[in-house]
Image (spheres, rainbow, N blue to C red):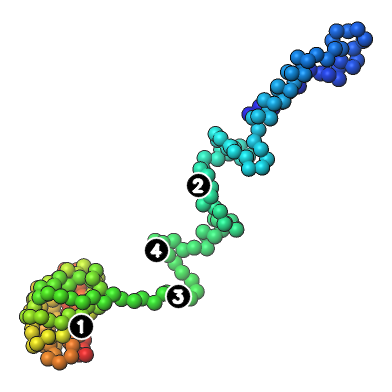
Amino acid sequence: MSNYTKSTNFTAKDALPTGDTGKIIRGTEFDTEFTAIQTAVNSKADATSPSLTGTITFNGVGLTATATEINFTDGVTSNIQTQLNTKAPIASPTFTGTVTLPAVTETVYAISGTTPAISATNGTIQTWTLSANSTPTDSLSSGQSVVLHINDGTAYNITWTSLVDQWKTDSGASPSLNTTGETVVVVWKVGSTVYGARVGNN
């Protein structure tokens, strides 16, 4: 970018005596001035919709953001940092006042087969109509739990030893399945131990 600097002092020519050759305004002087003016103009950006290249500097600070990055601020109506300061961090947030959480809808999963791996990834509520005597296996992680709604089909039985390590109901015995309706059992894992409890009939 260049600025225009006048090469010829035309006002000074007025003070020269008549007949002084320096008083003559020459075409080459005009050309020099207008060329310098045009060069300076060409190096400037238009005030309306300018197209800029290189590094843009504001108050001595170079702007390195791209046009796409700058456009991320489109629609911002107030100080961004002030807005961020009103938000809680994702990691270990601390809240004040009344905290409202959205309703939680659990996934209901239908178990099939006779040797299913019980996993909370499939859903925390699982239904199972037995098609034969069955032996479920453990695929839970510590801290996970699953509620099982079991229909015994036609008086089929479940062998629990590959899933449950310790029963907390029925004096530590595995539950007997209802021959009508459902038997509801919850299983949960703490560390490497899977616990189970018969919680009701349906």
Q: Which residue is mark 4?
A: 92
Q: Is residue 24 left or right of residue 81?
A: right
Q: Nearer the viewer, residue 24 or 128?
A: 24
Between disc 1 and disc 2, whose residue precedes?
2
Q: Which residue is mark 1?
A: 149
Q: Regarding mark 1 in the picture, which secondary structure is present there?
A: strand
Which numbered disc, 3 or 2, marks the residue closer to the eye?
2
CB of mark 4 within 8 Å of CB of mark 2?
Answer: no
Q: Which mark is residue 100?
A: 3
Check disc 1: other Cα within 10 Å, few if <14, some if 14-19, many if 20+: many
Check disc 4: other Cα within 10 Å, few if <14, some if 14-19, many if 20+: few
Between disc 3 and disc 2, whose residue precedes?
2
Find the distance from the CA under tag 3 to the CA under tag 4: 17 Å
Could you tell me residue 131's position as x and y percent? Answer: 10, 80
What residue do we see at 18% from left, 90% from top?
Answer: 181
Between disc 4 and disc 2, whose residue precedes?
2
Find the distance from the CA under tag 1 to the CA under tag 4: 36 Å
Check disc 2: other Cα within 10 Å, few if <14, some if 14-19, many if 20+: few
Q: Regarding mark 4 in the picture, which secondary structure is present there?
A: loop
Residue 51 to residue 202: above or below: above
Find the distance from the CA under tag 1 to the CA under tag 2: 53 Å
What residue do we see at 13% from left, 90% from top?
Answer: 178
Snapshot quadrant of residue 136? bottom left
Q: Amino acid at mark 2?
A: Thr
